[in-house]
Image: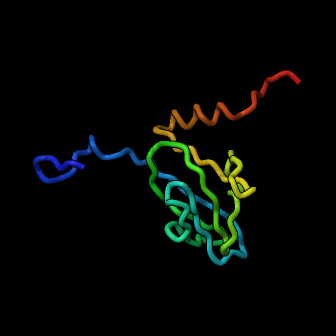
Amino acid sequence: MKPNRNGRKSPATEPLLIPVRFEFTDTSARSVCVAGCFNHWNPESKALARAGDGLWRSDSELPPGTYQYRLVVDGRWIADPMAPESVPNPFGGRNSVLKVARSAEAAHRDAAEHRPFGNSPK
């Protein structure tokens, strides 16, 4: 990035980063990490912290986009059971899909596209 006249990076040239929270619940887990295309599938780079009562949590910031990831629980790679979407991976399992929207309005529109209509005919 190119610094401005004051030597600071110009806000217009910095990528837009959106807050993202990863959460997982498992009372018997000793370690939980996230591995995905956003961290080159390296689970050691994104460990979740214990938040009590079996809850594990980590906050991140990612540019808007669609990402595939898996949880690594005690060394075992699993799909995120709370992810609304997943896709097959080349290893016979499924990768969870995370969609990071540019705004809350865009996130709402995207979520609405994946919900069934409440008054649809049977």
Residue 64's place in the image compared with 28, above or below, is above
45 in relation to 39, above or below: below
Q: Where does the image place residue 106, in percent across and percent down from the top left?
A: 52, 34
Residue 112 or residue 37, whichever sits in front:
37
Point out residue 87 in the picture as x, y percentages from the top left corner: 69, 47
What colour scheme has been applied to the protein in the rendered image? Answer: rainbow
Count numbered badges in the picture: 0
Residue at 59% x, 70% y: name it: 51
> Of all residues shown, which one is farthest toward the top?
121
Q: Nearer the viewer, residue 58 or 72?
A: 72
Residue sitting at the far front: 90
Task: List x then y, in percent, for residue 10.
Answer: 22, 45
Q: What residue appears at the point 52 percent right and 66 percent down from the top-left corner?
A: 46
| Residue 47 placement (x, y as % from top left) | 54, 69
Tell me the residue at 53%/71% (across/down).
44
Q: Who is closer to the viewer here, 91 or 84?
A: 91
Q: Does residue 68 appear left or right of residue 40 in this picture?
A: right
Q: To which quarter of the image does residue 35 belong?
A: bottom right
* Quadrant of the rendered image containing residue 76: bottom right
- Seen as rendered, the residue at the extreme right is 122
* Image position of 32 (left or right of 117): left
The quarter of the image holding the C terminus is: top right
In percent of the image, x 47 and y 43: which residue is there? Answer: 64
